[in-house]
Image: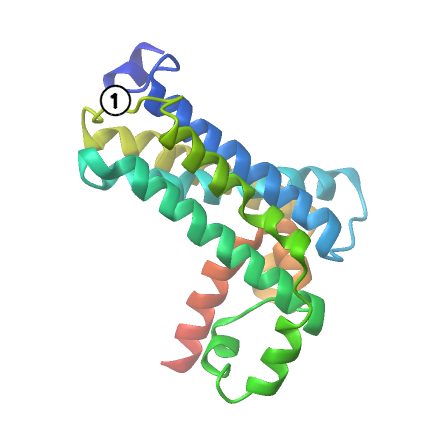
Amino acid sequence: MERLKKYGVSLNDKNVQFFLIAVILFWLKTYITYRIEFNLGIDNELQQFLLFINPISSALFFLGLSFLSKKKRWGAILVGIEFIMSFWLYANVVYYRFFNDFITLPVISQLKVNGGQTDSALSLMSPFDVFYFTDTVILILLLVTKRFPLKERSSKKIALVPLTLAIAIFMVNLSLAEADRPELLTRSFDRNYLVKYLGINNFSIYDGIQSTRSSM
């Protein structure tokens, strides 16, 4: 704990508590989404465990980037990042309902070409889909009502803690995934497998890298 305090991390700090609430809300929402929206084919307890933990690394990483912003604005930036991640998750939900697949970089570039299909996918939206943005609403309410009176963060070095932890968790996640499905990243062409083992955000990053390489 003393080492964490060196980076400005304390569980009694309202900033840290607000950050952890954001991470937990997004983590649990993503896991619930996996269970009710996607057909990922869970075959054993290890896969179930990986499905449960894989949203943590990306939540820590992307939300942790908020600590690199200006001191007075980091809370608003964090909420903005939460909204962007929620929007991306929801976009994949709507796309999956129609195409039974996940959004990839080539798909984004073809949205204008397949406008008719995109409109059909959007028709599958439901009023209950507001669930996918409840975490953002909760965070906004916490800020507005000052339940968590945020202060200026002391230093950008606090970002090293969630970013380092995110990378460590991802490496453990990947190692366990490789143990269950060897050569996951080299011989898996089923996007359901990649999302199941790595998570929607980590899959999107991987897909972006692969698409960029193939286009070079």
Q: Residue furthest bottom?
A: 113
Quadrant in which residue 172 is drawn: top right
- In this rendering, the answer to whether 131 lies above or below 165 is below
Tell me if 184 is positioned left or right of 111 in this view: right
Tell me if 45 is positioned left or right of 134 in this view: right
Q: Position of residue 83 (x, y in %)?
A: 44, 49
Question: Where does the N terminus fall, quadrant-wise?
Answer: top left
Q: Residue at x 69, y 68 (%)?
A: 124
Crowding near pointer 1: few (<14 within 10 Å), some, many (20+)? some
Q: Position of residue 137 (x, y in %)?
A: 48, 41
Residue 90 in sight here: yes
Q: Residue at x 31, y 35 (%)?
A: 75
Camera-nearest residue between 199 and 12: 12
- In this rendering, the answer to whether 167 lies above or below 7 is below
Residue 202 in sight here: no
Please, what secondary structure does the residue beneath circle 1 have? loop
The residue type indicated by label 1 comes to: Tyr
